[in-house]
Image: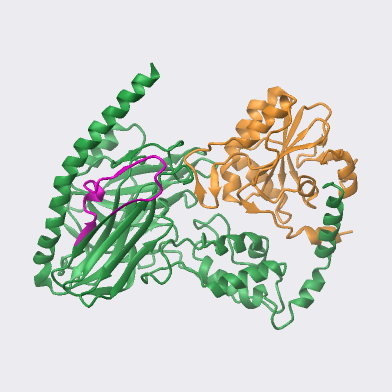
């Protein structure tokens, strides 16, 4: 049911500067979505000042590092429309974040994945199907309730399923974090 | 069937967003909740002490933009009373520095989020100003951690103790203090102690990095209160300053939570000394005594309602000044009340969902006067089920009393002053009866615990073969 090609959705939903299926990151590099050259694409939704999102930065780096040799590509979507380019640059430096980052100014990616909080992960397969969306793991049981350590690694499990060509056993989970706000996206829509 | 709706939903969203002027028009209605008229004051009074630049909170909530882009988050965290962080149950004891928000204010914030977080006409009231220096003026002594400690980017929360040499050559009495963390986003709380035994420094020497971890015993350790996120300066009751013996080590017992990037902490504390020693005896007693070591703590895996408790009848009147609940991760509920000779009850404290990370001392707004014959009761419940997300063991394990964080403790520490100084001895003697009984039981408990642990280890070894 959710198998509609992503390119179509992007065409329908966004007005990205280049072709509809092309994302441009904050360094000016282009990233195709879907990407015929990657078995899996993870998009991490983050905000620069959400403490829960920030606490996941090391795990995000680890997952991207461990799976980079396994045909998996990572992107990071900064979703605070009011964030400045300087804030995003500083945040990436502070958290040693070399994952290609997109400023999702008009929430095209948010809509595409139906993301609602940061941090949240969307996992697309080669064809652009949304194979998984939700928490990275269950480190947070609730706001303010971190566990000693995560006991369920939902995103890693989903990745293993996608890389093995299996259906993801739990394709949707509820992420715990900061709600994604549309604040600031309206002004941008009105800019000619 | 789901995807075709997405573009429609988004289109509606965009239509809504582009009609910002319509929202603004709505907000001029008398009953509309707006930032300028309603929300700014709540942010400033309830949130800004932490949520402003360069404070512990991760983001500021001073301006319209700060708050508006987090309207849904604010609604969610105030709705569950996760924020402002204050774990004591409303209406059950009235405490100083309560970080509390009213039901009406919560409803206002929810209505504001619902309305799309309008700014409203006019301008917001000016945010409060906060003093940049020490709140109580020039301190008599400022102590800083001897070495900075590095908190890694990642991993579980860290509990660590830092002994710091006190350079005074004579005994001092501390009438007030103020703690100042350096890496504000990672320091969650710090408890202050004085150690005259040198034990803390020994533990520190054995550990290569600054400070030491664990809850190793320190004989004669004296409490000098503490600080948790949101805390300000602390002033002790007139005539009852805290004793800081000459040659002590001041101990910061600190809790850090990694933030995703490496941080360096070197905490400082400003001390204000009293001119003369305490004229009133500071009474401190625990129920159950000895952090629960004689209270029979042996909690089966899966048991969500294991409960301990103790009672103490006062032989003479006291002014109850504050309470400090203490348990580790699977402590769940604390309740304490006093039963007066006339049969009435005075609520003392109730924490329904204990969170180890908020180690507050709860100081009463006005000291509670308890007459002779009043009985103080304490009840502490533990949740050792897998459903308790704070359970450090997964699956749950049998839990005994102990000093490590996966062990449990349990007591409520009461701080009081005798109403009449001449009664101090009688009150101490009455308490010592209970304390000694628990001391004897603690020896029995410890024997039983060792035997049970041996049996568990033997079973594990045989099942492993």
Give the residue drawn at x 65%, y 75%: B36
Between B435 and A91, the one nearer to me in the picture: B435
Q: Which chain identifier belongs to the orange chain?
A: A
Is residue A102 shown to the viewer in this render?
A: yes
Q: Which quadrant, please, contains the C terminus of chain B?
A: top left
Asked if residue B201 lies left or right of residue B268, the reply is: left
Q: Which residue is at 45% across, 36% downward?
A: B395
- Apparent side of residue A173 relative to residue B377 in the rendered image (left or right): right
Figure disc tally: 0
Left or right placement of residue B97 versus residue A29 in this view: left
Q: How is the image coloured?
A: by chain
* Res. B273 visible in picture: no
Give whichever of B303, B192 is nearer the camera. Answer: B303
Range covered by the magenta-colored residues: B283-308
Q: Position of residue A153 (x, y in %)?
A: 59, 35
The residue sitting at the top extreme is B465
In the image, residue B227 above or below residue A91: below
Horizontal and vertical percent position of residue B118: 71, 71
Q: Which chain is green?
A: B
* Residue B290 screen position, x and y as percent: 22, 50
Instruction: Give me the residue at 78% from left, 27% from top.
Output: A38
């Amino acid at each position: 049911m959710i198998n509609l090609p992503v390119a179509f959705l992007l065409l329908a939903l966004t007005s990205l500067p280049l072709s509809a299926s092309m994302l441009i990151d904050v360094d000016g590099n282009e990233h195709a979505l879907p990407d015929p050259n990657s078995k899996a694409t993870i998009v991490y939704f983050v905000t620069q000042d959400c403490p829960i999102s920030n606490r996941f930065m090391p795990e995000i780096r680890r997952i991207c590092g461990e799976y980079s040799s396994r045909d998996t590509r990572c992107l990071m979507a900064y979703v605070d429309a009011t964030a400045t380019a300087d804030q995003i640059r500083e945040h990436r430096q502070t958290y040693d974040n070399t994952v290609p980052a997109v400023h999702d100014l008009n929430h095209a990616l948010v809509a595409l994945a139906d993301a609602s909080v940061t941090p949240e992960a969307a996992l697309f397969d080669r064809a652009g199907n949304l194979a998984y969306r939700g928490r990275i793991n269950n480190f947070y049981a609730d706001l303010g309730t971190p566990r000693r350590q995560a006991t369920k690694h939902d995103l890693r499990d989903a990745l293993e399923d996608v890389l093995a060509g299996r259906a993801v056993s739990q394709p949707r989970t509820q992420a715990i974090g900061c709600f994604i706000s549309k604040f600031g996206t309206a002004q941008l829509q009105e800019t000619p | 069937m789901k995807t075709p709706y997405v573009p429609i939903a988004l289109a509606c969203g965009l239509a809504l967003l582009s009609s910002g002027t319509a929202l603004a028009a709505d907000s001029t209605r008398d009953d509309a909740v707006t930032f300028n008229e309603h929300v700014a004051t709540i942010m400033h009074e309830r949130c800004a002490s932490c949520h402003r630049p360069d404070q512990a909170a991760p983001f500021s909530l001073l301006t319209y933009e700060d708050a508006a882009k987090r309207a849904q988050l604010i609604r969610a965290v105030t709705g569950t009373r996760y924020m402002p962080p204050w774990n004591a149950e409303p209406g059950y004891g009235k405490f100083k520095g309560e970080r509390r928000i009213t039901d009406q204010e919560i409803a206002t914030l929810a209505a504001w989020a619902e309305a799309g977080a309008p700014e409203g006409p006019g301008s917001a009231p000016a945010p409060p100003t906060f003093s940049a220096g020490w709140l109580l003026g020039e301190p008599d002594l400022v102590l800083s951690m001897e070495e900075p400690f590095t908190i890694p980017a990642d991993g579980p929360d860290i509990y660590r103790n830092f002994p710091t040499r006190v350079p005074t050559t004579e005994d001092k009495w501390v009438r007030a203090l103020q703690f100042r963390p350096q890496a504000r986003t990672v320091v969650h709380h710090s408890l202050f102690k004085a150690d005259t035994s040198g034990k803390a420094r020994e533990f520190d020497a054995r550990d290569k990095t600054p400070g030491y971890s664990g809850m190793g015993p320190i004989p004669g350790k004296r409490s000098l209160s503490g600080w948790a996120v949101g805390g300000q300066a602390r002033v002790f009751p007139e005539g009852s300053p805290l004793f800081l013996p000459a040659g002590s080590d001041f101990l910061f017992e600190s809790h850090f939570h990694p933030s995703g990037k490496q941080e360096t902490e070197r905490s400082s504390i400003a001390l204000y000394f009293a001119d003369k020693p305490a004229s009133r005896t500071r009474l401190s007693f625990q129920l159950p005594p000895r952090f629960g070591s004689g209270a029979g703590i042996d909690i089966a895996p899966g048991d969500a309602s294991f409960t301990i408790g103790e009672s103490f009848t006062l032989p003479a009147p006291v002014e109850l000044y504050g309470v400090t609940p203490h348990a580790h991760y699977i402590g769940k509920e604390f309740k304490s009340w006093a039963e007066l000779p006339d049969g009435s009850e005075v609520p003392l404290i109730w924490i329904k969902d204990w969170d180890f990370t908020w180690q507050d001392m709860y100081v009463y707004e006005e000291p509670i006067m308890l007459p002779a014959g009043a009985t103080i009761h304490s009840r502490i419940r533990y949740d050792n089920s897998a459903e308790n997300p704070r359970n450090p063991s997964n699956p749950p394990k049998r839990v005994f009393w102990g000093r490590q964080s996966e062990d449990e403790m349990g007591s409520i520490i009461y701080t009081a002053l005798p109403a009449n100084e001449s009664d101090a001895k009688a009150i101490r003697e009455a308490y010592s009866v209970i304390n000694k009984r628990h001391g004897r039981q603690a020896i029995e408990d410890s024997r039983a615990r060792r035997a049970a642990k041996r049996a568990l280890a033997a079973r594990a070894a045989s099942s492993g073969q």
